[in-house]
Image (cartoon, rainbow, N blue to C red):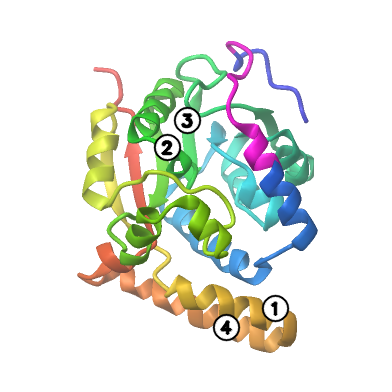
Amino acid sequence: MAPLGGDLTACAPAPGEPGHWAEVGEAWRRRSPDRLWRAHSDVVNRALLERWLRARPTGRVMKTDLFDEAFGHGMVDLLRGLYGTVLGIDLSESVIRSARLEETGARAVRGDTRSLPFRDAVFDAVVSISTLDHFDRLDEVTRSLREIHRVLAPGGSLVLTLDNRAHPIVWLRNLLPYRLVHALGIVPYYVGRTAGPWQARRLVAECGFEIEESGTILHCPRVLAVPVSRRLERAAGPATRTGFLRALLAFERLRAWPTAPWTGHFVAIRAIRPPLA
């Protein structure tokens, strides 16, 4: 793990719940599941960042977890091309090691979004891709948003995605006990409380942000796409896999439809910390 610059760190990382994510990471490493599906997820998330982030070659950006980088292509290389300094945090030391950030020139530290180990107003952007939807309570989401607001410089940008509670499958999944959906193989790791598009916007605004844009992403039928991707990963050739990914990406056109609040698996919000008066 690369050391943090002294101008960023305010205190030691707060304790979190790294044990669960370390176990998830070890299981993921052993089985290497869903590489094809994660490739699609990375493409969708990277397209969102390319639309919503503006390059600041001397700026600083923080990514609020490194699971995408540990077990897929991730987004850090894209962020490295936009900002001078990229810093990733994660609860799990093993996930940080697996992310191999040294290859991209980014840095990492173990940290908890509910108590970020950084001084006030040190980042020009924060990217939070499905990190805050793994808590037991919405007040922990709010606590994390307030911490993100604190470490963002005035005028700094937040790109946030959360599981979309308005999506029928997400709603049903979260209604059922975690132990049941985990035992059935529906979710590989803990999923927590989340919000639909309207409630998510309200939570972000109540934490002091100005919302510039919002919508939903990942519109393909995930309940079907994930098992099909697993089968193709095992049995199909490169051309078939490429065609499958192209077909999945075509579903993203649904983000412009009136039904988007219910077909997108994730709520996506672009917001800023208001500039000082």
Q: Earlier in the sequence, mark 2 or mark 3?
A: 3
Find out whether the residues at labels 2 and 3 contact each other: C-beta distance under 8 Å: no
Query: Which residue matches tag 1?
Result: 233
Q: Nearer the viewer, mark 2 or mark 4?
A: 2
Amino acid type at circle 1 is Glu
The CA distance from mark 3 to mark 4 is 37 Å
The region drawn magenta spans 10-22
Q: Earlier in the sequence, mark 2 or mark 4?
A: 2
The CA distance from mark 2 to mark 4 is 35 Å
Mark 3 burial class by Cα count in 10 Å: few <14, some 14-19, many 20+: many
Q: How many marks?
A: 4
The image's mark for residue 244 is 4
Looking at the picture, how far across and down is residue 75, in whole percent? 60, 51
| Residue 177 visible, this angle | yes
Amino acid type at circle 4 is Phe
Q: Quadrant of residue 204?
A: top left
> Does residue 62 appear to the left or right of 110 in the view shown?
left
Looking at the picture, how far across and down is residue 177, in whole percent? 43, 52
